[in-house]
Image (cartoon, rainbow, N blue to C red):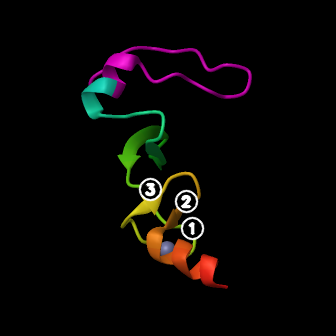
Amino acid sequence: MKLITERKIDELGRIVLPSEIRSKLGITSKSTIGIFEDNGNIVLKKTEPSCKLCGSTNQVNENFSLCAECIAKVKQS
Ligand SMILES: [Zn+2]
């Protein structure tokens, strides 16, 4: 594991991901990041957004966190 940089956590528990890392990994303001705990370490991984209702990662609308199929079902009801 390579140390890229060190950041201070702000009073709300936030950190900023360095822009060079974001662009290297294709992370944008709409990306979903998974936060994992592994033997006392925090691991961040870019994850695919998944649908809140069915868990699908196919055609997920990131504003609603729902897949196209579930959005269609919700609109029908
Ligand atoms: Zn769905």
Point out the image quarter for the N terminus: top left
Q: Residue at x 51, y 15 (%)?
A: 7
Q: Earlier in the sequence, mark 1 or mark 2?
A: 1
Q: Residue 65: within the magenta?
A: no
Drawn side of residue 9 relative to residue 41, left or right: right
CA neighbours of label 1 inside 10 A, class few (<14), some (14 to 19), many (20+): some
Q: Residue at x 48, y 33 (%)?
A: 29
Q: Are marks 3 and 2 in contact (CB under 8 Å)?
A: yes
User: In the rendered structure, which amino acid carries the disc numbered 3?
Assistant: Pro
Q: Are marks 1 and 2 in contact (CB under 8 Å)?
A: yes
Q: Is mark 1 within 8 Å of ligand 1?
A: yes
Residue placed under numbered mark 1 in the picture: 52
Q: Is residue 42 visible?
A: yes
Q: Where's residue 25, x and y in %? A: 28, 33
Q: Which residues are magenta?
A: 1-22
Local secondary structure at mark 1 = loop
- Give the numbered dot on residue 65: 2
Residue placed under numbered mark 3 in the picture: 49
Tell me the quarter of the picture where residue 33 sits: top left
